[in-house]
Amino acid sequence: MAIPQKLQTIIDVFEASPGDFRVEALLDYSRRLPELPARYSENHDLLEAVPECQTPFFLATEVDEDGTAHLFFDAPPQAPTVRGYAGLLSDGLDGEKAETIIEVPDDFYMDMGLEEVVTPLRLRGMGAILHRLKSQLRTALTT
């Protein structure tokens, strides 16, 4: 399974960095998470909940006619770890082809050394986010 170059660059930086940098980088990604467009912020029912996350987390995907995927995430600022993971996914995967995102390994984040700075419960939530994201993309490609 191939990892898109933008995401691979993020993985490489995290992997080569000490734990305190990883925490700061996640916090930075949490601050850079794009705001939801009005169509989602004004109609939250269009977002899918990820109940496996400890904190309220919601996502939506859109796929253009050419297969380009757009990712939208909503996570509270009080959950910087999960919000940071969403920001990381946004930076690393938004704008890629849906098929490419579906091929990303489910546990790619384990190569980033996040298990050193994130609790196992949060790691499971991260896996659930990627699983639901891929599920939405698969559905979009088949309809």
Image (cartoon, rainbow, N blue to C red):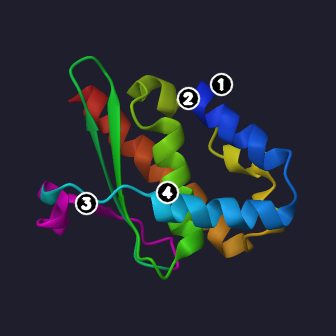
Mark identifier at residue 86: 4
Q: Residue at x 63, y 62 (%)?
A: 26
Seen from the viewer's position, the closer of residues 105 and 43 is: 43
Percent of width and height locating residue 5 = 61, 25
User: Which label sits in the foreground, 4 or 3?
Assistant: 4
- Please report whichever mark, 2 or 3, sits nearer to the chain's N-terminal start: 3
Mark 1 closeness class: few <14, some 14–19, many ≥20 residues within 10 Å: few
- Please report whichever mark, 4 or 1, sits nearer to the chain's N-terminal start: 1
- Please report whichever mark, 2 or 4, sits nearer to the chain's N-terminal start: 4
User: Which label sits in the foreground, 2 or 4?
Assistant: 4
Q: Badge 2 is on which residue? A: 103
Tags 4 and 1 in contact by the CB under 8 Å rule? Answer: no
- Image vertical order of residue 106 relative to residue 114, above or below: above
- Please report whichever mark, 1 or 3, sits nearer to the chain's N-terminal start: 1
Q: Badge 3 is on which residue? A: 47
Q: Badge 1 is on which residue? A: 1
- Please report whichever mark, 2 or 1, sits nearer to the chain's N-terminal start: 1
User: In the picture, residue 103 is in which quadrant?
Assistant: top right
The residues bearing labels 4 and 3 have C-alpha atoms spaced at a distance of: 14 Å
Mark 4 closeness class: few <14, some 14–19, many ≥20 residues within 10 Å: many
The residues bearing labels 2 and 1 have C-alpha atoms spaced at a distance of: 6 Å
Q: Secondary structure at mark 2?
A: loop
Residue stretch in magenta: 39-54
- Please report whichever mark, 4 or 3, sits nearer to the chain's N-terminal start: 3
The residues bearing labels 4 and 1 have C-alpha atoms spaced at a distance of: 21 Å
Seen from the viewer's position, the closer of residues 40 and 140 is: 40
